[in-house]
Amino acid sequence: MLLGVLTKETTHLHLVWYRDRRAWRLIALRFVPWFAGLSLAWEIAQLPLYTIWAERTPGYIAFSVAHCTAGDILIGMAALLLALVLLRTGSLGSWRWGRIGTLAALLGAAYTVFSEWRNIAILGSWAYAASMPRIEVGGMELGLSPLLQWFVLPPLAVYLTRRSTRSG
């Protein structure tokens, strides 16, 4: 009887995503590259919506794009991993891809609200150009582009990851 319980527990341990090497490989070799490429494209596309576009040198702008893209990648990975934990995701074969992408998007968006508030209102690290569409969130005016970034990119990267897994 004890042997049966140990076997059941041991089998269960192999069903958790973080013990599945295929899941880590998928995250590192499929999700991160997709998310990195999408983040870089988004950062470049939204540059004119920030004052940096008109006020800084091309070198500073290039550094800022690289810096922000690297930050986006870290936030995206953290959002994905936290989504996997919160959803109590099993092994790779049992992933509920839509739920994972949706929760990662919500987590990324929540962090963005905090980050934009901190960097604009408190630190003054950056500012929106007049062309930035804005919405009010929690009594704060927030740029629509950085918020949309997190509602679009994590689910899109999860979708592309899943699609590339099926074809490869």
Image: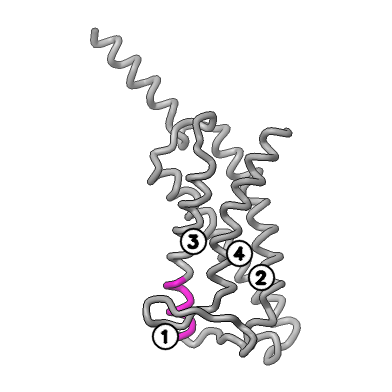
Q: Amino acid at mark 1?
A: Ile
Around disc 4, counting alpha carbons within 10 Å, would you say few (fewer than 14), some (14 to 19), or many (20 or more)?
Answer: some
Residue at the spot of label 2: 43
What range of the chain is rendered magenta? Answer: 113-121
Q: Which residue of the protein is positioned furthest toward the right in this rendering?
A: 58
Q: Amino acid at mark 4?
A: Ala
Q: Amino acid at mark 3?
A: Gly
Q: CA–CA distance between discs 2 and 1?
A: 22 Å
Q: CA–CA distance between discs 3 and 1?
A: 20 Å
Q: Main secondary structure of the magenta part?
A: helix
Residue at the spot of label 3: 108
Q: Which mark is residue 26?
A: none
User: Which mark is first along the chain, 3 or 2?
Assistant: 2
Check disc 4 and report its element: helix, strand or loop: helix
- The C terminus - image quarter: top right
Residue at the spot of label 1: 122
